[in-house]
Image (cartoon, rainbow, N blue to C red):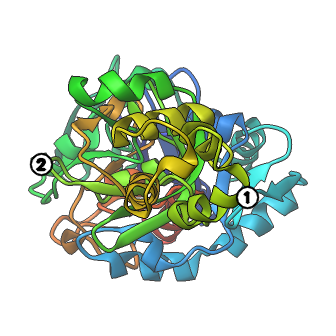
Amino acid sequence: MKHYDVVIIGAGAAGMMCAIEAGKRGRSVLVIDHAKKAGDKIRISGGGRCNFTNLDTKFDRFLSQNPRFCISALKRYSQHDFISLVEKHGIAYHEKTLGQLFCDHSAQDIITMLRNEMDDAGVELQLQTSVKHIEKKDSYQITLDHDGVTASSLVIATGGKSIPKMGATGFGYDVAQQFDVPLTDIRPALVPLTFSDETLDWVKPLSGVSVESSVRHQKTVFDEGLLFTHRGLSGPSILQISSYWREGDEITVNLARGQNIADKLKSLRSEAGKQSISNVLARLIPAKLAQMIIEQAGLVGNLADQSNAKLDLVGNLVNAWTIKPAGSEGYRTAEVTLGGVGTSALNAKTMEVKHQSGLYFIGEVVDITGWLGGYNFQWAWSSGWVCGQAC
């Protein structure tokens, strides 16, 4: 068996970043992945333009049983460090909204950058290769499809279960369990929410309608776009709140953020009182949505026919629509996996398992999950970088 200083399983964002840094230190590094190409999730991210980081990255944008665990890595390798790497390679980028940075051209630019950095650092990459077995003797022995390798350090960068059609599996969690590393609850995150058949009966006609919304779950609120789908709700605000929502919980949705619908309808009585209540409401929100709201309120007639109490009811249905989703679309469409390898078992400065020398977990497989908007990529870069300094 050929021996390496470091074997990294997973050629995604975290794995490639770790390989680059370990290689720069003169370590012999092998990266293994079962996929045909490195960086598949990078390639499809951000609509093909890769939302590679966020200018406003800070620890309170991450969910974990210990949300402060990520602070060390994010400080040692920040969003500004990764931006400098992007600029070094001459990759054009732009800011969209809320600090989100995207490639001007293609997500492939980021993959090419990482591959070039790996080549410069002398990293070996072995694709379309499956790991059959791992055991620890004097070193880590990794049995592959047709041969095997040994490593002084073994890094697990295999991500979570999200988007199984791209080959995502629970492999990293299996390795954790093999070496008695605790796991937290694992669930899909940044994922569309679905409705029961009963709710879908009246929501389905709204499929494709989008609004600027404010979505609340308990004390957590996100002010971003919302999209009605044939299964339920999607859009940035819903993806964000899905990381906090649990089955059986309600969410409250303001379907007209920035507008007090009841007050506006009352003020329009003088000029539009002879128009139907549905048509007047359609001035303020999409027509299909206005029709659905009026039907739910059970109102008929013109605006002038409606009492203040009835207009308050309409306003409440628009500005504080309370709904109980039946579930989510699951790992099939989830952007990330919430939960994972428990941070209590890891050294925050190195990502090494405290009780298992030479074993490291980085990226999405760890119980650190960022908001939508480039935060999860930054966690991949940061955790991969600090691990690459130590493994």
Front-lying residue, 223 or 299: 299
Quarter of the rendering occupied by the C terminus = bottom left
The residue that appears at 56% across and 56% down in the rendered structure is 256
From the top left corner, tell me how far across and down residue 45 is, in percent. 61, 39
User: In the image, 308: left or right of 130?
Assistant: right
Marks 2 and 1, Cα distance to the nearest angstrom? 36 Å
Residue 363, image quadrant: bottom left
Q: Earlier in the sequence, mark 2 or mark 1?
A: 1
Amino acid at pointer 1:
Leu
Mark 2 residue crowding within 10 angstroms, few (<14) / some (14–19) / many (20+): few
User: Disc 1 on helix, strand or loop?
Assistant: strand
Amino acid at pointer 2:
Gln
The answer to whether residue 257 of the structure is visible from this angle is no
Closer to the eye: label 2 or 1: 1
User: Disc 2 on helix, strand or loop?
Assistant: helix
Residue that badge 1 annotates: 101
> Could you say which disc has been placed on residue 89 in the image?
none
Residue that badge 2 annotates: 177
From the top left corner, tell me how far across and down residue 21 is, in percent. 59, 62
Q: Is residue 347 above or below residue 378?
A: below
The answer to whether residue 298 of the structure is visible from this angle is yes
The residue that appears at 47% across and 20% down in the rendered structure is 128
